[in-house]
Image: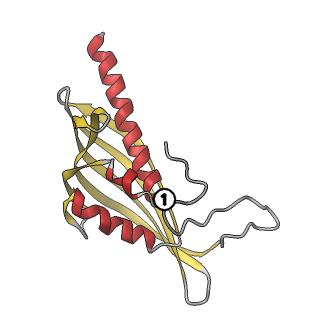
Amino acid sequence: MDQALQELLDRRQIEDVVARYARTLDWLDDDGQASCYWPDAEIDYGFFKGKAADFLPVVMDIERGSDRRWHMLGGLIVKFHSETTASSECYGIFAGARRQEDGSLAGNLYGGRYLDEWEKRAGEQGDEWRISNRLYLVDWQSDLVNQPDFTPNPDFPLPTAQIAESGHPLYRPM
């Protein structure tokens, strides 16, 4: 029973890291994004292959180049190999949009999967799980044209937030 309970706790910690990964990209939280990877993690996104410490400034610059970004990860499956190592796979959808010459917002919608290796090591807050190796695979892409601006639609006025830099007033560290 103790091993099963520990595995549930460890699985929950990994789920939190996956959720934090998406959230910190969208809110442009550099430190939160860094907390998802061990600095020596091997990263392969195709356009970048190397260590996580070198990847973080690259990916955050890409995210800052978008006027709108949105990541959703789900379908996470975790397999534990030991008390300190695991593998996972999850699906991800990412949408990004930039201001076009005509003033409209347009971009792309991507679907892919994250093939991750995990290690539980001593961290700032005790033992913690972080990604130690990541391979990102793109499965499909679709164009997003004529996306809504950052002002509420008068016919259906839902609130909007333009996140252009770190430290947005609505961002709540969690």
Asked which quadrant contains residue 131, the reply is top left
Q: Secondary structure at mark 1?
A: helix
Q: Residue at x 32, y 53 (%)?
A: 34
Visual colour scheme: secondary structure
Residue density around tag 1, few if under 14, some if 14–19, many if 20 or more, within 10 Å: many
Which residue does the numbered mark 1 point to in the structure image?
26
Amino acid bearing label 1: Asp
Q: Residue at x 32, y 47 (%)?
A: 36
Asked which quadrant contains residue 2, the reply is top left
Q: Position of residue 42 (x, y in %)?
A: 18, 54
Asked which quadrant contains residue 125, the reply is top left
Q: Nearer the viewer, residue 73 or 170?
A: 170
Look at the picture and state if 108 lies above or below 158.
Answer: below
Total label count? 1
Which quadrant is the N terminus positioned in?
top left
Q: Position of residue 91 (x, y in %)?
A: 39, 49
Q: Can the viewer see residue 132?
A: yes
Look at the picture and state if 166 lies above or below 120.
Answer: below
Q: Can the viewer see residue 143?
A: no
